[in-house]
Image (cartoon, grey):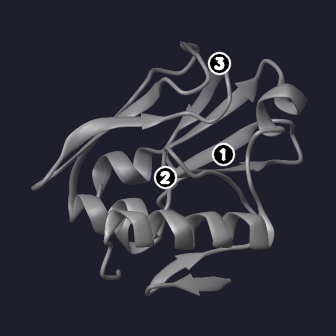
Amino acid sequence: MSDVKGCDLPEDLLYSIENNVWVRQESDGTATIGLTSYAGSLAGQVVSYTPKKVGKAVKKDKSCATVESGKWVGPAKSPIGGEVAAVNDAVSANPGLINDDPYGEGWLVKIKPDDWDGDSAALKTGSDAIDAFKAKMEADGFKGC
């Protein structure tokens, strides 16, 4: 796990830097998607989470869930296209899990990818992701998580 300006960024995940989301391919072929700790810090304490329904198609870089905090309401954009396979009922009951455990219990949705290889090719991982987040945080004038 890397720390960039106080934000945790696991190096084993894939990231859409511009959308501040992570994705992990699971052994069953689905892909779990969540917001980064950086996104949670920018948004503030999350108070509402409204995912797309199971079975709903989601296009790459389009909303897979709507997230609301005291400072922000907006889409969590999926880094891959596919069909929603599962939503996180624990986050529905306690949206703060997105802030408290963004890479564990605070995941947003699981997607059955249409084209994992094609969609994931543009995502960053490891030191490439860490370097890209460092540059983004610097450019944004971000003080820290």
Q: In front: 141, or 117? A: 141
Quarter holding the N terminus is bottom right
Q: Which residue is mark 2?
A: 20
Residue ranking furthest to the left: 70
Task: Give me the residue at 30% from left, 81% from top.
Answer: 143
Q: In front: 87, or 100? A: 100
Q: Which residue is mark 1?
A: 32
Residue ranking furthest to the front: 139
Q: Earlier in the sequence, mark 2 or mark 3?
A: 2
Q: Secondary structure at mark 2?
A: loop
**Residue 83 circle label:** 3
Q: Secondary structure at mark 3?
A: strand
Task: Give me the residue at 49% from left, 23% from top.
Answer: 62
Quarter holding the C terminus is bottom left
Task: Give me the residue at 85% from left, 27% from top.
Answer: 118
For the question of whether residue 98 can be seen, the reply is: no
Spatial CA span between label 1 and label 2: 14 Å
Give coordinates of residue 27: x percent, y percent: 89, 47
Spatial CA span between label 1 and label 3: 12 Å
Q: Earlier in the sequence, mark 1 or mark 3?
A: 1
Task: Give me the residue at 47% from left, 59% from top.
Answer: 106
Q: Earlier in the sequence, mark 1 or mark 2?
A: 2
- Amino acid type of the residue that numbered disc 3 sits on in the rendered structure: Glu
Give coordinates of residue 94: x percent, y percent: 29, 58
Q: In front: 120, or 30? A: 120
Of tags 2 and 3, the one toward the viewer is 2
Within 10 Å of disc 2 (Cα), the crowding (few <14, some 14-19, many 20+) is many
Give coordinates of residue 133: x percent, y percent: 56, 66
Q: Is residue 55 above or below residue 46?
A: above
